[in-house]
Amino acid sequence: MEMVQVVFLTVLVFFVLVTIHEWGHYYFAKRAGILVREFAIGFGPKVFSHKRDETRFTLRLLPLGGFVRMAGEDPEIVEVQPGQTVALRLDGNKVTKLFLDQLDLRKNVVRGEVEHIDLEHTLKVRLQVEGEVVTYDIHPKAMMVLKGQDIQIAPFERQFGSKTVAQRALSIFAGPLMNFILAFVLFIAYILQMGVPVENPTHVRLADVSDDKPAARAGLLKGDLVEQINGIPIGADINKLVTLISESEGKEMTWVVLRGQERLEVKLTPEHIKGHQGGKVGITPSTPMRSASFTETFKFAGKAMVNTTERIFEGFRMLIFGQFTLDDLGGPVRTFELTGQIASKGIEQLTYWAAILSLYLGIFNLLPIPALDGSRLVFLGIEALRGRPVDPNRESTVHFIGFAMIMLLMLVVTYNDILRLVKG
């Protein structure tokens, strides 16, 4: 596969995984009536920005995730204080724009000193205009203009905190939920491409043959059926095949394979690969496959979801109990590297890998780690039990500390990934 195509597919995988996650937050927040200010892919400086309706869609420089910024959870709203001079643009008797700076440059506006303003509940502003006190209604979608930026006001009923616990919980849970749905769809796509194992198989099939490895150099191809090795029948025993290869490091082997109706004899020598024990020839063995029926497709996709979930939680268990080294952890660099390697093996393997990543992203985000969706759901659960929310300042502090720790860990593993690449 061409390098440009591999890079494109790698970036596409990450873009789709993050976008579908954030879209879940966005869609259910909008359904609940929450004002969504920004839908962002990535962090850091903006690379691309486009506003549609009330939401600004942005692509940011650092491909480390994404976020959906909802009203009531954002820091950019500027408070207008009594005594402050502002300029108002009106549509009838309703304020559509509140100008907070460069007032002398504003045309067709009413200038005055604020006596009282409420942008959340009553949506009214009382001004002193040329010695006269005037009250205006504020449009629920009015814009505040400051330093060249238009910021839409958020009446209380449009804020995240005004919604029921159930509505807020669904808006948060929807992100991981979309990743679970995507993972299931991708597993279905993989099964439709690859099929399912045949009943009572008689041969081991080569599901993949790595370039520039002994198997490829000997002329073996993806789809070949292994009949015997060194005169020993293999049947459908993958473990026997792997054991024979592992025990034959540096020793020439004679393979008999079936390719269509043709029986071929090839000779190859397993070699040592750094970091692995025993000989390797660069193959991925599997049992022969057949097309899946409609019901089998969903059945095997469900099994793949369950088996992959078990492996993910086993990885978490090892992480918690310290059964790992720093080299076992991988950050964005390593994940991009691995995804690129898998993309080069074909769209089928990339589909399967993308399903695993999507499932992992959904599960990881539901962990009760500060700053993740799981932690926010925990706070909502506490609120449901207590009948009142946790102090927002305390919750924000917890999430900030968690986010800082995650970013620190990300920096450490990314540095280790880059160091590993430099050292080869």
Image (cartoon, rainbow, N blue to C red):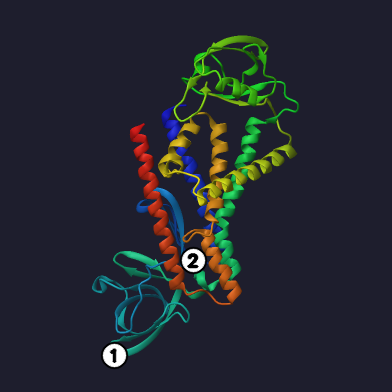
- Crowding at dot 2, Cα within 10 Å, few <14 / some 14-19 / many 20+, comes out as many
Q: Position of residue 378 (x, y in %)?
A: 55, 65
Q: Position of residue 82 (x, y in %)?
A: 33, 84
Is any atom of residue 72 visible in this view?
no
Numbered-mark total? 2
421 over 144 or under it: above or below: above
Q: Position of residue 372 (x, y in %)?
A: 49, 58
User: What residue lies at 63% left-to-right and 32% top-to-bottom?
Assistant: 193
In which image quadrant can residue 197 be found? top right
Is any atom of residue 163 visible in this view?
yes
Dot 2: element? loop
Q: Amino acid at mark 1?
A: Gly
On the image, numbered disc 2 is attached to which residue? 35
Indicate left or right for 358 with 98 as reference. right
Q: Are marks 2 and 1 in contact (CB under 8 Å)?
A: no
- Residue 114 disc label: none
Q: Nearer the viewer, residue 135 or 414?
A: 414
User: What residue lies at 60% left-to-right and 25% top-to-bottom?
Assistant: 285
The quadrant in which the C terminus is found is: top left
Q: Amino acid at mark 2?
A: Leu
**Which residue sits furthest left?**
104
In which image quadrant can residue 139 be found? bottom left
282 over 228 or under it: above or below: below
Q: Position of residue 365 (x, y in %)?
A: 52, 54
On the image, numbered disc 1 is attached to which residue? 131
Measured in 3D between alpha carbons, the distance from the residue under mark 2 to the one under mark 1, in whole angstroms, is 37 Å
Q: Earlier in the sequence, mark 2 or mark 1?
A: 2
Dot 1: element? loop
In which image quadrant can residue 222 be found? top right
- Crowding at dot 1, Cα within 10 Å, few <14 / some 14-19 / many 20+, comes out as few
Closer to the eye: label 2 or 1: 2
